[in-house]
Image (tube, rainbow, N blue to C red):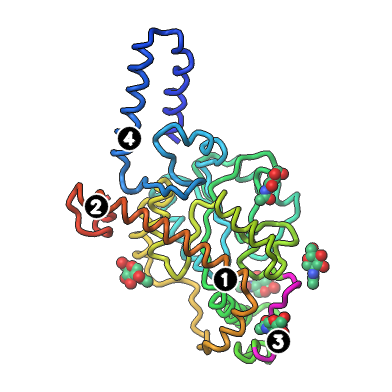
Amino acid sequence: MKYSSVLVEELKPVRSFRFFPRCIVLTFIAGIVFYCAYSVIQVPVNEITSGRLQSGSVPCDCPYDISELESIDRQRLFYNRVPKCGSTTLITLIRKLAVKNNYIHFNSKIYDKKNVDEEEQRRIVRQVKSTPSPCSFDRHVFFINFTKFGESPPIFINIIREPVERIISSFFYRRMVARQNKTKVKPSAYWLNKKFEHCVLTPDPECTFLEGHNYSVLQLPYFCGQEPECQLLNDIGALQKAKQNIEKYYAVVGTLEDMNMTLQVLEAVLPHFFRGAYHVYHNLGVHRNQNLHKEQVKEEVKEVLRANLTAEYELYYFVQQKLYQQYQTLVEETQKKQYKFAFTSLDQLLDYR
Ligand SMILES: *[C@@H]1O[C@H](CO)[C@@H](O)[C@H](O)[C@H]1NC(C)=O
Ligand SMILES: *[C@@H]1O[C@H](CO)[C@@H](O)[C@H](O)[C@H]1NC(C)=O
Ligand SMILES: *[C@@H]1O[C@H](CO)[C@@H](O)[C@H](O)[C@H]1NC(C)=O
Ligand SMILES: *[C@@H]1O[C@H](CO)[C@@H](O)[C@H](O)[C@H]1NC(C)=O
Ligand SMILES: *[C@@H]1O[C@H](CO)[C@@H](O)[C@H](O)[C@H]1NC(C)=O
């Protein structure tokens, strides 16, 4: 990143200046202080950082952030996409933004290997780190610990969804895919025509979530990681680890329910990758991958499922709260700018850019 090299160059001379007359040192320090204050005032709206955003946020223009700059590889982005959360649309968006913002995007066609062995993890790490930057990657894969392989992690992002809505969506999506596939042996008519409500209330193993059992279809393992306990339903340790990884490695985790907010936060926090995201997204037209065969599911049936997915929900609310805080910071910063430039709305300010 352009800025980091400027920072490093500026900081180096500080140490060798200690033998110089005090007035020169003081002038130099005053210069740095003035420069920092000036930079802060000059930060455009798309470079706003939230205080709570440690990793992945755009670096503060003051020297405090250097350790952060070292621990996260800000030139590389990894979207370890959770299925059925609008990822097809987001990838279409990223492809367009890659051209616009001048980076390379690598899309993975592997949909069914989310839990990968150590060799595959190492291969992914090597691929991400050896590609010329700036670049971004996507794949349906549980969180990968780059540190374990002696590498600085890329900026992680993801989008999740209301847990039961996601399970319903997957249920009908599986059937739609099976119906459309002409080559594969058709599953039984019973399976194809299964009613979701019946599946939950029976209870059918396809729609049952039991404590102490492992489930790779939930959202939490995407943030917890590759370890077997990450798939254990409602495991406290797995939930803790997922939250810690979000705090540490994810610049933004959005939600499908708050897509507009997600896009604006992505754009503000990661302008090098997401500048223009909001408008490009709304010009993409119809959302792809929408399943018209989805049936309406009664609230009380959803409640039956919700009762068993406590960790999934805790993670969802954790992500939602973090997203709202990032958005709030953005709005507050924008209001300051509005005052300065007499803009009337956030959208207008984003338009102006
Ligand atoms: C990642 O790997 C490092 C080094 O092995 C380890 O110290 C750290 O706890 C791991 N982090 C996670 C989230 O598993
Ligand atoms: C249909 O199923 C076969 C066998 O599982 C698979 O190899 C193929 O990719 C599927 N085709 C489509 C269009 O999904
Ligand atoms: C919820 O958990 C209870 C207790 O483990 C179990 O009896 C029930 O079948 C589960 N229901 C669903 C829909 O997963
Ligand atoms: C779930 O995964 C753990 C850790 O690998 C394993 O010990 C346990 O036997 C698995 N449980 C079930 C029900 O498959
Ligand atoms: C998101 O923004 C678009 C365009 O500004 C608007 O049409 C749409 O209603 C918004 N959606 C939500 C859920 O606010």
Of the numbered discs 3 and 1, the one sitting upstream in the chain is 3
Instruction: Name the residue that disc number 3 marks.
Output: 204
**Residue 282 in sight:** yes
- The answer to whether 273 appears left or right of 351 in the picture is right
Instruction: Name the residue that disc number 1 marks.
Output: 313
Of the numbered discs 3 and 4, the one sitting upstream in the chain is 4
Dots 3, 2 in contact, CB < 8 A:
no
Which mark's residue is nearer the viewer, 3 or 4? Answer: 4
Instruction: Determine the CA span between mark 2 and mark 4.
Output: 21 Å
Figure quadrant of residue 2? top left
Give coordinates of residue 268: x percent, y percent: 38, 51
Which amino acid type is shown beneath numbered disc 3? Asp
The residue located at (53%, 59%) in the rendering is 158
Which amino acid type is shown beneath numbered disc 1? Tyr
Of the numbered discs 1 and 4, the one sitting upstream in the chain is 4
- The answer to whether 138 appears left or right of 49 in the picture is right
The residue located at (70%, 57%) in the rendering is 226
Which amino acid type is shown beneath numbered disc 4? Ser
Of the numbered discs 2 and 1, the one sitting upstream in the chain is 1
Q: Which residues are magenta?
A: 201-214
